[in-house]
Amino acid sequence: MVKEIVTVAAALLGGRLSEEEEALLTRLGQLALEGWQMRLRPEIEPAACGDALVFASALTALDAFVAGQALGGAPSSFRAGDVSLSFGGEASRNGAQAARIMAPFVSDQGFWFQGVRG
């Protein structure tokens, strides 16, 4: 399934990737897939998601890939268990689109605080 994710992400990027870019996108695709699989409702098997899981994982991997390119390879986010931190800017359109695609299959939509005064 990771190969399919990389193929979709590469197509969205507009074509061929260098070996280094493909290796990075493969790892990001694997991580994205694992992340989405962990959020699936207990009664949902990955195969039941069809192409949605592949496409959402590709968008998620693409998000991290493009953010890393824009920052010169520096990470734009960090995740440890259930805690994630993002640096700079608002949520990406790719991430939001991936969340909409997977909405019927995941147990939660997550949450975040925006503009909360302390």
Image (spheres, helix red, strand yellow):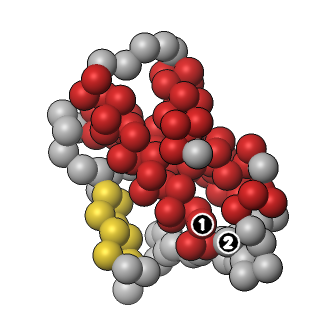
**Label 1 vs label 2: CA separation?**
5 Å
Work out which quarter of the rendered image holds the N terminus and state it.
top right
Circle on res. 47: none
Does residue 8 show up?
yes
How packed mark 2 is, by other alpha carbons closer than 10 Å (few <14, some 14-19, many 20 or more), is many
On the image, the x and y values in percent for residue 16 come to 43, 14
In this rendering, is residue 55 above or below 101?
Answer: above
Q: Residue furthest bottom?
A: 118
Work out which quarter of the rendered image holds the C terminus and state it.
bottom left
What amino acid type should be assigned to the residue bearing mark 2?
Answer: Leu
Q: Residue at x 58, y 30 (%)?
A: 8
What amino acid type should be assigned to the residue bearing mark 1?
Answer: Gln
| Secondary structure of residue under mark 1 | helix
On the image, the x and y values in percent for residue 83 come to 38, 78
Does residue 70 show up?
no
In this rendering, is residue 7 above or below 112?
Answer: above
On the image, the x and y values in percent for residue 88 come to 32, 51
Residue marked by disc 1: 37
Q: Residue at x 51, y 15 (%)?
A: 14
In this rendering, is residue 46 above or below 83?
Answer: above
In terms of depth relative to the viewer, which is nearer, 87 or 18? 18
| Secondary structure of residue under mark 2 | loop
How packed mark 1 is, by other alpha carbons closer than 10 Å (few <14, some 14-19, many 20 or more), is some
Quarter holding residue 38:
bottom right
Are discs 1 and 2 less than 8 Å apart at CB? yes
Q: Residue at x 79, y 79 (%)?
A: 43
Position of 53 with respect to 91 (left or right) is right
Position of 33 with respect to 44 (left or right) is left
Q: Tell me how many marks there are.
A: 2
Residue marked by disc 2: 40
In terms of depth relative to the viewer, which is nearer, 45 or 53? 45
